Amino acid sequence: MQVLGWCAAAAGSCTALPQLWRIHRTRRTTGVALPLWQMTLCTGIAWALHGAHGGRMQMISSNLVVVAAALAVLISVQRQRRLSRSRVFGPPSLAGLALGLADAGLPGFVFGLLCLAPAVMGQAVQSRSLLRQPDIQGVSAGYLLTNLFVQILWLRWSFLAVDSATTWCAAATACAIAANVALYVSRRAGWLSVPAIV
């Protein structure tokens, strides 16, 4: 169980690297959904605190790296789109702290359901972007696939660790990410076109 947890942590720490590389290489954030990365920041903070409550170093360490990576993506988006720093960073940081602190007094599955909301909302916004944005060059397939793999690892770990919070959240998030992978592939292959903007 510990080995699988550390594998999930190591892979989870790398999820944003393909997206960061894509932004660095293309110098574009087109198609990158700002709310997805805000929700990633929020849930990264919450899951790091969840790991701290349970004494699970693999969960703490991987989510602190996720928080740092989400911040890097958000900084790129914020600068390129000239958005207010407080609007980009404030709400997700406060929400993540609130979720993480609430975890101390909640049953595991309730915390998982609460964390599920921002995780799935972020993926839903990315779905909308993949369906509507004429240019998705800023979106990284590597990020989507790595994130899907990580959610599957955490789901497997959650069964062994009997962590209902992780089970609920990883299962639903994996489904949402799988839908985004399908949308991304459909767009890139030309199977799905974007409606013309009138």
Image (cartoon, rainbow, N blue to C red):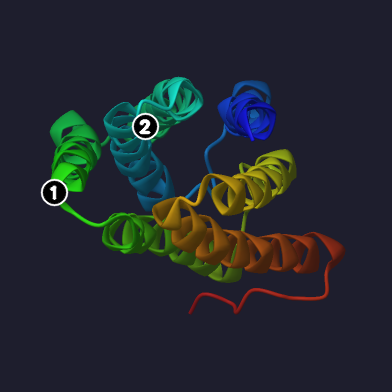
Tell me which numbered mark, 1 or 2, is placed earlier along the sequence. Answer: 2
Give the residue displayed 38% in from the left and 32% down from the top: 74
Q: Is residue 123 above or below residue 153?
A: below
* Camera-side residue of 19 and 189: 19
Image quarter hosting the N terminus: top right
Count of marks, rendered view: 2
- The x and y percentages for residue 111 are 28, 55
Residue 48 in view (yes/no): yes
Q: Is residue 194 left or right of residue 124?
A: right
Name which residue type carries label 2: Gly
Q: CA distance from mark 1 to mark 2?
A: 14 Å
Q: Is residue 17 above or below residue 140?
A: above
Give the residue displayed 20% in from the left and 30% down from the top: 85
* Camera-side residue of 154 and 174: 154
Classify mark 2: residues with Cα within 10 Å, few (<14), some (14-19) or many (20+). Answer: some
- The x and y percentages for residue 53 are 27, 32
- The x and y percentages for residue 175 are 61, 67
Q: Is residue 27 left or right of residue 55?
A: right
Q: Secondary structure at mark 1?
A: helix
Name which residue type carries label 1: Gly
Q: Which residue is mark 2?
A: 51
**Residue 105 - label:** 1
Quarter of image, res 67: top left
